[in-house]
Image (cartoon, coloured by chain):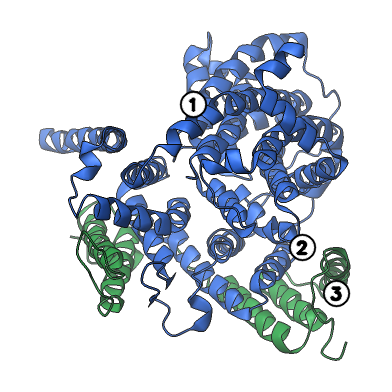
């Protein structure tokens, strides 16, 4: 313990902040609410955080962020519970958990599946916390030396990565990024004071609130498409969950996947643009590849739960690294967290660590506490979550609508925000129908003003010479990485297309 | 080219949507000063984003026309319209009638968006939700809204 304190003096400071009774309470409320809503199928972490965001507005910055990150882990984990018990992933990162987790539940082993998911998540969360404490400060040091050109290129990389890793068509995802950037322009230009794309509406001169966009695109649109599908017929297992604890054999099989999942998740989480979903998929693929008997997968293999669950939690945790140290969110969810930071009057970036050490380290310590709470909270409360799942959707969605409406209205006490939310809700539903994934859009929307500002500054310093992005080494590195990412995506597509053409020729 | 089922072609309409947004961005930013690369004016970023976006729209639409067709499927107009109207009326009512009437409008309208509508259930749900919301948001968090227009 003594050594640990020396190794991580800052972390120690963080724990002293996070362990205050008040902060512990907010952490608990966050985890509880997050799980509660995360368990409900069809509501992902984005919608959950957007919905619960207004609750934190009246709190000081530290408890507000502690509560929000509690919500984030909570809904992440709640999604896994739903995936295992109902085979309806509450969020995209638990899609793979469905495969073997639900199979285990069918065999009457829902208890061990949930327990392994919780334990794996806890271990991954612990490692993630240590990684942030260890690598956060040096990364922030590096980031302090970034100029406008580096920031611009880094954001380009993050955005392209989010498009590459999005579901579906790459071109569409890139177009969604452009649309997000354009939406980010709405409002008063900081340099010229000119109102852009505000169409003479006074409420638009401050720009569109990202909560409004997030709730419209993710909340409203999701409800409409859920209703379209008949509100989800559920394949719920009503059997009582008897033994909760995994057997020795389960643990023997699961520990290695937990370690590997944690490693994969940490890597993808720290990468801007990637996130829990891709981490979970990769972990599942890896476990299947490494398994002695791959045919067990899909039939209730515990490795298929342990790996992805650890990976998505490690990724969720490590996603805070770029968000907090660079001020650049790695995912749409992180963009929401950054937005919350801005609402609290804190400019995100590497200076947060030095200027607000209580916030930074308190948040990190509370992440670990939040993860511990998840284990303590979820295992005994499984019964409650199961009950919650039996509530029919026709009773749930009016409640969700109510929360969204009150939340959006309370942002500025302005009904314009509600009308905008409906507009984005309609747009979001159109995106769903046209198979355009909205996550890259919201990330671009948050980054848009930053990107324009840094582009402007970089070009001002270089006297209008665009080669500045390629001649500064760090910036060039980011751009090369971006190009590589795009190539990786394009090549298999080219290969597949060519195969099709060749096959058609042969026939 | 598969013009026959154009209305059900996701990529084509996605392309059209992006072209519309792109052209609109260029059009509405036409009066903003462009500046130069060295001193970017407020029109620079939106103008080039709009052009780039239009190009992407064209590519996507072309993919829809010449590539494999991805289907759109049926549109769920009923929940879309009913829920949209519910939120808009809620906003309107919040400005003039107070918290509780607004919630009543929103919740009852929302339940109409679903396929099943059972009156006793809806009444119970409404009472529970309104009571909960008043407890949490007005007395718990302390949002400064009037409960009714007179109170």
Q: Which residue is mark 3?
A: B123
Q: Which mark is in front, 2 or 1? A: 1
The answer to whether residue A104 of the structure is visible from this angle is no
Q: Which structural element holds mark 3? A: helix
Q: Residue at x 59, y 36 (%)?
A: A316
User: Where B138 falls versus A129 (above or below)?
Assistant: below
Q: Which chain is green?
A: B
User: Where A52 falls versus A495 (above or below)?
Assistant: below
A473 with respect to B86 (left or right):
left
Q: Earlier in the sequence, mark 2 or mark 1?
A: 1
Q: Within 10 angstroms of label 3, few (less than 14), some, or many (20 or more) residues? A: some
The answer as to whether the residues below labels 1 and 3 share one chain is: no
User: Residue B69 lies in what quarter of the image?
Assistant: bottom left
Q: Which residue is mark 2?
A: A395
Q: Which chain is blue?
A: A
User: Where B121 falls versus A74 (above or below)?
Assistant: below
Q: Position of residue A232 (x, y in %)?
A: 64, 53
* Label 2, label 1: how far apart the Cα atoms are: 40 Å
């Amino acid at each position: 313990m003594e050594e640990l304190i020396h190794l991580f003096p800052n972390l120690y400071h963080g724990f002293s902040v996070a362990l205050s009774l008040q902060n512990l309470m907010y952490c608990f409320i966050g985890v509880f609410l997050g799980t509660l809503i995360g368990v409900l199928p069809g509501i992902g972490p984005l919608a959950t955080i957007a919905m619960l965001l207004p609750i934190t507005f009246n709190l000081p910055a530290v408890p507000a962020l502690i509560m929000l990150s509690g919500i984030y882990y909570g809904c992440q984990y709640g999604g896994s519970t739903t995936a295992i018990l109902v085979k309806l992933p509450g969020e995209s990162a638990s899609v793979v958990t469905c495969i073997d987790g639900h199979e285990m539940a069918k065999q009457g082993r829902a208890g061990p599946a949930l327990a392994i998911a919780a334990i794996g998540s806890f271990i991954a969360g612990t490692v993630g916390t240590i990684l942030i404490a260890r690598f956060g400060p040096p990364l922030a040091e590096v980031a302090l030396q970034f100029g406008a050109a580096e920031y611009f290129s880094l954001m380009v990389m993050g955005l392209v990565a989010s498009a590459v890793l999005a579901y579906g068509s790459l071109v569409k995802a890139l177009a969604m990024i452009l649309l997000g950037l354009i939406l980010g322009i709405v409002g008063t230009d900081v340099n010229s004071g000119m109102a852009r794309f505000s169409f003479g509406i006074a409420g638009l001169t401050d720009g569109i609130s990202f909560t409004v966009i997030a709730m419209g695109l993710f909340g409203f649109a999701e409800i409409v498409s859920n209703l379209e599908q008949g509100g989800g017929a559920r394949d719920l297992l009503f059997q009582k969950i008897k033994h909760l604890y995994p057997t020795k054999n389960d643990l023997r099989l699961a520990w290695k996947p937990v370690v590997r999942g944690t490693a994969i998740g940490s890597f993808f989480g720290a990468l801007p643009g990637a996130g829990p979903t891709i981490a979970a998929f990769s972990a599942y693929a890896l476990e299947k590849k490494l398994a002695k008997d791959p045919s067990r997968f899909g039939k209730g293999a515990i490795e298929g739960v342990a790996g992805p669950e650890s990976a998505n939690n490690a990724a969720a945790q490590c996603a805070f690294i770029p968000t907090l140290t660079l001020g650049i969110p790695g995912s749409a969810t992180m963009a929401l967290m950054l937005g919350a930071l801005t609402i609290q009057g804190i400019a995100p970036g590497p200076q947060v660590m030095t200027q607000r050490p209580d916030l930074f380290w308190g948040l990190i310590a509370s992440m670990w506490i939040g993860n511990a709470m998840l284990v303590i909270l979820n295992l005994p409360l499984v019964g409650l979550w199961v009950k919650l799942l039996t509530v029919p959707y026709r009773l749930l969605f009016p409640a969700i609508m109510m929360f969204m409406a009150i939340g959006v209205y309370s942002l500025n006490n302005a009904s314009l925000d509600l009308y905008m939310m409906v507009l984005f809700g309609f747009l979001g539903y159109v995106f769903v129908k046209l198979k355009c994934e909205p996550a890259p859009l919201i990330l671009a929307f948050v980054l848009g003003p930053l990107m324009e500002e840094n582009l402007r500054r970089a070009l001002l310093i270089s006297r209008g010479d665009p080669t500045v992005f390629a001649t500064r080494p760090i910036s060039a590195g980011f751009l090369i990485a971006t190009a590589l990412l795009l190539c990786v995506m394009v090549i298999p597509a080219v290969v597949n297309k060519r195969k099709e053409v060749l096959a058609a020729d042969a026939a | 080219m598969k013009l026959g089922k154009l209305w059900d072609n996701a990529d084509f309409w996605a392309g059209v949507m992006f072209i519309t947004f792109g052209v609109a961005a260029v059009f509405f930013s036409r009066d903003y000063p462009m500046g130069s690369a060295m001193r970017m004016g407020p029109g620079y970023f939106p103008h080039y984003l709009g052009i780039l976006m239009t190009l992407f729209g064209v590519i996507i639409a072309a993919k829809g026309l010449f590539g494999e067709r991805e289907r759109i499927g049926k549109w769920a107009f009923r929940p879309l319209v009913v829920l949209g109207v519910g939120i808009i009326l809620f906003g309107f009512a919040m400005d003039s009638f107070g918290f509780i009437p607004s919630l009543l409008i929103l919740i009852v309208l929302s339940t109409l968006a679903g396929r099943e509508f059972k009156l006793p259930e809806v009444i119970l749900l409404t009472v529970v939700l309104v009571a909960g919301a008043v407890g949490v948001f007005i007395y718990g968090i302390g949002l400064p809204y009037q409960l009714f227009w007179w109170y």
